Amino acid sequence: MRLDQVRALFALEKTDAALAELALVDRTQLEAQDAAQADLLEGSMRIGGFGSDDATADRLIRKALDGPLPDGDRHYAKGLIADTTPEALAEFEGWRSGPTRPTSTPGP
């Protein structure tokens, strides 16, 4: 599936290539959970850093939260848009200790 390719590119820190691949995904054709994960994935790639688009990232992450995300992804998304550092840390701790690993984030 194309979302797996996007995740792999993002994990390899090839964000531009991942965003280009994600642009080819017709989210209207995805199941609701996959569409929410695509929104979260794109939002997490666009937040912070050089060339970021925080307004778009925030909109995509909030849209993802309106969809059916697994618990781990929901904690991760809430942590990304938390208003305070303690709130973000609490959500990320929930992400780490949850029963499932988020599907929208790279790493081991």
Image (cartoon, rainbow, N blue to C red):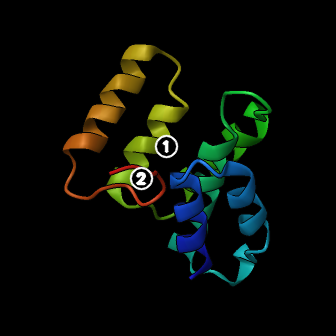
| Residue situated in front as seen by the camera: 45 or 32 | 45
- Residue 62 shows in this picture: no
Residue at point 26%, 38% (across, down): 94
Q: Is residue 40 above or below residue 79?
A: below
Residue 27 percent across, percent down from the top left: 71, 74
Q: Is residue 64 above or below residue 21?
A: above
The image shows a total of numbered marks equal to 2
**Mark identifier at residue 22:** none
Residue at point 53%, 19% (across, down): 83
- Residue 23 shows in this picture: yes
Residue at point 19%, 43% (across, down): 97
Residue 55 percent across, percent down from the top left: 77, 34
Q: Is residue 34 above or below residue 12?
A: below
Secondary element at image label 1: helix
Labels 1 & 2 near each other (Cβ < 8 A): yes
Could you tell me how far apart the alpha carbons at marks 1 and 2 are, in whole angstroms? 6 Å
User: How packed is label 1: few (under 14 Cα within 10 Å), some, or many (20 or more)?
Assistant: many
Q: Is residue 36 above or below residue 76?
A: below
| Residue bearing the label numbered 2 | 73
Secondary element at image label 2: helix
**Mark identifier at residue 77:** 1
Residue 2 percent across, percent down from the top left: 62, 78
Asked whether, in this view, residue 49 is left or right of residue 41, the answer is right
Q: Quadrant of residue 30?
A: bottom right
| Residue situated in front as seen by the camera: 12 or 28 | 12
Q: Give the quadrant of the N terminus.
A: bottom right
